[in-house]
Image (tube, rainbow, N blue to C red):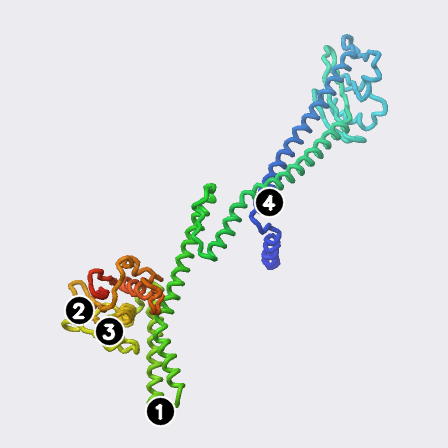
Amino acid sequence: MSGIRHRLRPAVTAFLHRLAPRTLRGRLSLVAVTTAALLMLVLTVAFNAVAEHRLQHQADDELRTRAAAVATTIDTSRRTVRVLETSNDALLDTNVWIYADRRLLEEPPNAGSLTHVADALAERGGRRCVTADVDGPLRLCSQPVPADKSRVLVVTALDLSPYRSSADTLLMGSLALDGVMLACTYALTRLAVGRALRPVRTMTDQATQWSAVASEERFGSTRHPAELARLGTSLDAILDRIRTLLRHERQLTGELSHELRTPLSRIIAELDWWQTRPRSADQTHATHRVIADAAQSMRTICDTLLDDARGGTPTAPGTAVVLPALRRLTELPDVPAHLTVTADGPPVVAGIPPALLERIVSPLLTNACRYAHSKVAVRAHRTPDGVRVEVIDDGPGVPRPFASRLFEPGQRADPGDGHRGAGLGLPLARRLARSAGGEVTYDPEHSPGARFVVSLPAG
């Protein structure tokens, strides 16, 4: 049996879950109707109990009134109790029993078995009432009559059918009223909850729309009730996080595209050069080596940028000898011959991985080579608080009005200057330097040309 109960319990639970409303409005309406039904049940039972008691009390009062009227026709002044005849004798004798010293003096015609109930009341004596079901519900009450020499008792009976009919009518009426009230409660609750949840549905639709397009709209600008205001604050925080994630995603995509363009161009150029005409084995080997170096460079770029995107710090911290890392940047095919790379004093060591150092300096060096007239210099030296790398060119420099927006993503001083670029290199260099505890700055006092300074922790 216990096994059967264990098998039936999940089935019953699943069935009840299927019966439960799926919407919040339906559940709240069900709770309201259930609560109202319990309250109405209690009130209905109490009301009908009070009404039935009141009807019974009225029946008892009527029986005692009749007994008092019958008592006026009984002569107890003599030794023998006599029942006097009156003009309303037939009416008074209906369902009336008169006893003297427990002896039946008078009974109604065709009383039948009802007389036994009256005899029982007479035997017990006193003022009592009982309910009997003899050919229908009847109420019998005994009433003593004051007498000097004998004990006289009057028992009267009353048909309770009209009172029961009134009680049944009250019960049916109260049940019908309960049904109407429950239907009204359900309808009004659904209407009220629907109107109360309408702003929530609107806010949900707006949040879905705004999150899809990264809108600047927010719920905090609209007045709402306290509960919805808290919901709006939570949704605003979620939308802000979504907007931040989308911005980071676009930034990472743009930076990867910007940094991978150069090695990818090298691969395409080598393949085009190799396919134009037959090549020797040495030339083919050299092409393969260039493609492998470019692919490794792409892998390093992806690892560096993804490490920074994950936590803002390199996942593989280390040190880099600055001069060899800078010279590797000069091996790119687009680097001009007038580039010089120098380091002052003993070997300068930075406290960041070599790949990260290359990614920080590479955009600065690319811009310097792009705009320089005849000279590009990269100098590295120690400082009291770390390592400093300067990238200097003799180009036109940065226009003073544009200097304040130099490190903003997507900004270029002159988009129509004939040079390719998306305005992402300098912001990327500064962000990577800051993630390693350093900084990239522009020296507006340098002239002619431009000077960018990279400050990094020492290794």
Tell me where residue 99 sits by quadrant.
top right
Q: Is residue 158 above or below residue 37?
A: above
Query: Which residue is denoted by mark 1 in the rendering?
Result: 280
**Pointer 4 residue:** 30
Crowd rating for badge 2 (residues with CA inside 10 Å; few <14, some 14–19, many 20+): some
Give the amino acid type for the residue marked by disc 2 in the picture: His
Does any portion of residue 317 appear in the rendered image?
no
- Residue drawn at x 76%, y 27% is 162
Q: Quarter holding the C terminus? A: bottom left
Contact between labelled residues 4 and 1, with CB atoms less than 8 Å apart: no
Q: Within the image, what quadrant is residue 330 found in?
A: bottom left
Q: Residue at x 20, y 63 (%)?
A: 446
Residue at the spot 23% in from the left edge and 72% down from the top edge: 376
Which kind of residue does numbered mark 3 sit on?
A: Leu
Q: Which residue is outermost to the bottom?
A: 280
Q: Residue at x 83, y 11 (%)?
A: 86
Q: What whole-number distance in Å separates the C-alpha atoms at marks 4 and 3?
A: 74 Å
Name the residue type under label 1: Ser
* Badge 4 density bin: few <14, some 14–19, many ≥20, Cα 10 Å: some
Answer few, some or many: residues within 10 Å of disc 1's Cα (few below 14, many 20 plus, some between 14 and 19): few
Pointer 4 with pointer 3, Cβ within 8 A:
no
Relative horizontal placement of residue 347, taking residue 239 as reference (left or right): left
Under mark 4, the amino acid is: Leu
Mark number for residue 381? 2
Q: Nearer the viewer, mark 1 or mark 4?
A: 1
Left or right of residue 364, residue 55 in this image: right
